[in-house]
Image: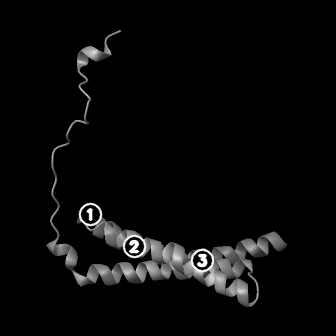
Amino acid sequence: PLVTDIGEQLLMYLSVSGFFITVALSYTGGLQGTGDTRSPLYISIVSQIGVPIGLCTVLQAMRGLQPADIWLAIVLGHLTRAALSVLRFRQGRWRHLTVDIEPARPALGSRLSALDFRL
């Protein structure tokens, strides 16, 4: 019974978290597709490391951690990620990015040819 109660509690947190992570992944994917790769990186660092670890650290110092506290920290991290991703996307700066694509250059000292692979 204890394990199923904890599992039921976790699923309730995950059902809420799923909405936020879906929104976040859609918007960060859109940003990355337009060439804005730094913003999603910084948003992920703040929301997936800073928020959950920061909240868990504060709660641990105040009263100790319970499983629900950790799950709440994860949900708040996903909420933060979704909010920051939507805000960044709505700023519209991605519309003015240019992506320079250059052909790949051979590495220094590599002069491999088809003849190098003969048995």
Where is residue 13 shown, x and y percent of the image?
A: 62, 78
Residue type pointed to by label 2:
Tyr
Q: Mark 3 highlights which residue?
A: 53
**Viewer-side residue, 3 vs 28:** 28
Whichever of labels 3 and 2 marks the residue nearer the N terminus, that label is 2
Instruction: Tell me if mark 2 has few (under 14), some (14-19) or many (20+) residues whose alpha carbon lies within 10 angstroms of its own.
Output: few
Q: In which quarter of the image is residue 117?
A: top left
Tell whether 108 sits left or right of 22.
left
Disc ID at residue 42: 2
Query: What is the distance, in whole Å, between disc 1 and disc 3 at their CAs?
Result: 29 Å
Instruction: Specify whether 43 is left or right of 89.
Output: right
Residue 69 in the image: state x and y as whole percent.
68, 82
Q: Does the CB distance between marks 1 and 3 fall below 8 Å?
A: no
State the count of labels: 3
Q: In which quarter of the image is the N terminus?
A: bottom right
Q: Position of residue 79 (x, y in %)?
A: 48, 82
Residue at the spot of label 1: 33
| Element at label 1 | helix
